[in-house]
Structures are given as C-alpha cells and as structure tokens.
Image (spheres, grey):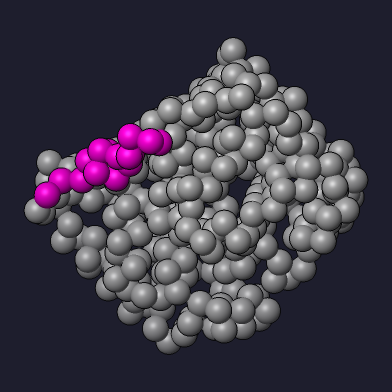
Amino acid sequence: MNIRPLSPELAEKARLELNEDPKRIQSDIEHIKEWIAKQPHLRARTDDQWLLTFLRGCKYSLERTKEKIDLYYSFRTLAPEMFLQRKHTDTVFQEILASGSCLVLPKKASPVAQSVLIGRPGVLDTEKYKVTDFMAVTNVMQKIMLLEDDNTVVAGARFVMDFENVNMAFFFQMTPTLMKKMSVYSQEAVPLRFKGGHYINVGSGFETIYNMMKRFLNEKTKSRLHVHNKNYEEMYQHIPKEILPVEYGGSGGTIAEIVEYWQKKIAEYSDWLEEDLQFGTDESKRPGKPKSAEEMFGLDGSFRQLEFD
C-alpha cells in the first residue's frame, strides 16, 4: 500500500475526527478500487493516496465515499468550464498564476492547523480573464493540496476572498447557475473539509452576490462564513498573522515568493496534471439514468437573474 504515514499529531486528529483506523485503511481502499472497476461509466484515479483522501473526506463511510467519487468525476463531464477551461500549460493559466490572484499559503500555524487559500480576483483584468479561468487555477492548486498536503485532508481548509478593486464586471459573471455549480462542488463533490470563509475589502455589488450565494449553501457552511471587510484584526482571530503574506500584515513571505513557490510546484506536477485530464465519466455508459447538468444544476425560475442596485 503506497500511502504516507501521518505525523503523530495528525494521526490522533484523524482518529478522533475522521474515525481513522490504520487497520482498516488497506481493506477500505481495496473495496473502493473494486467498486470503481465495476462502474462502466467512471474513469477515476485509483492511486492509494488519492482514494485515501476521499475516505478521509467522508470519515470512512464507504457509501459516502462512492457517492463523492462519482460526483467529483461527474463534474468533469457536466461542468467542464470549472475544470477544463484552462490547462495548467496554457498561457492564460500561467498569467493568472503569476498575478498572485490565487494563493495557497505554504506555512501552517501548527502541526495540526488547517490550510489557508487566498483569492484576490481584483488583481485580474476582467476584460481579459473570466471567473472560470480563475477557478481553473484554484482547482489545480486544490488538487495538489488534496494529493500531498495531509493538513488539508485531515484538518481542512479556510479561504480568504479579498475583493479589493473587484469591479462590477466580475460580479456580473457570477450567474446563479455558476453559483449553484460552485456550491454543489464545494459541499458535495470535493473531499475537502471546509472550516471557514473570510471576506475582506468588500465593496459595492458584494452584498448581492453574497446573499444570493448563501441561498445555495447548507446551514453548516453558512455558519462558517465571516465578513471582516477592513477589520484585519478580526480576521487574525481565525487566521494567525504569522502565516499570512507580508502584504496582509503577516510574516509568511511575500506574495511574489508564494507565487514562485506555486509556479515551481505546478511545474513539478505537470505530468500528473496532464494525466489527470483523462478522468471523468461517460454518462452514456452509466447504469440506469445518466446524470445531466439540468438535473444537477437546474434552477428555480426565481434564481435565474441577478439584480444589482
């Protein structure tokens, strides 16, 4: 079995919070592999470490793990704009990465601390880049985190969305359909423990998007959202200063240094990311009724339009 051993601190957290039993891991992974092999519609990774990420994300419920794997790969087929809009080798992808609009902080606050992601869409030119371009970059970074970062998988992740200099063109791209896809993906498909969302430097247009987005979220997710605006001290109560970039009052390196770190990491994973593009579903081969985008993301008529004051 090809998996990384956890640190003693994370192993104890996994035991207490995820029901992890080292004696069961191999048999559970084999069970999931056998199940995948019997699904004619499903093209999924079967690396031990990758499947363990889904087991941990589902607290070792085998049925939930199967459902999440199926849904995760269904997104590749039914919402390709969220994953396949830009490959990691595309010029646009590299430009967005270099802009520092998507950051995953390399530092952790403690051996059992959560990971922190920062989105800074306001540094992008909305005439040139789409929201889905931005999402394609964050999703690639997220995949790498799920594969290699045990803190992310066991302890979970928080995100910070910095809306400084975000213009209305960005908000107009956030259609109800896209918000529905984002909410289904984050809450039901990705094996990531969401521990908190933090919004800073918000301006006009934000409240409309924020209130609309919350209509698609479950109560647990909504309870973990925090709007700090300019109150960084309040944010520091959730995310320690020492892991944040210098530009946010922290000591976790500069944005430029974090960008360089991720440019190198994505380059290191280039072959893996290229291979990963082949996975997904063939709905024509799904036993029973094929899944459709309308079924998964269909909207009530009242959700189809956004109105901005």
Q: Residue at x 69, y 53 (%)?
A: 226
* Residue 97 among those drawn in magenta: no
Task: Read off the magenta span.
Answer: 289-303
Is residue 219 visible in this depiction of the protein?
yes
Quadrant location of the N terminus in the rendered image: bottom left
Residue placed most toward the observer, 289 or 167 = 167
Q: Tell me the quarter of the picture where residue 240 sits.
A: bottom right
Residue placed most toward the observer, 123 or 88 = 123
Q: Tell me the quarter of the picture where residue 168 sits.
A: top right
Name of the residue lying farthest toward the left: 288
Q: Residue at x 59, y 35 (%)?
A: 208
Viewed as shown, does residue 143 lie left or right of 35?
A: right
Q: Residue at x 54, y 83 (%)?
A: 15
Viewed as shown, does residue 30 lie left or right of 86?
A: left
Q: Is residue 109 above or below residue 1?
A: above
Viewed as shown, does residue 209 lie left or right of 276?
A: right
Quadrant location of the C terminus in the rendered image: top right
**Residue 213 image point, x, y percent:** 52, 43
**Residue 218 image point, x, y percent:** 47, 58
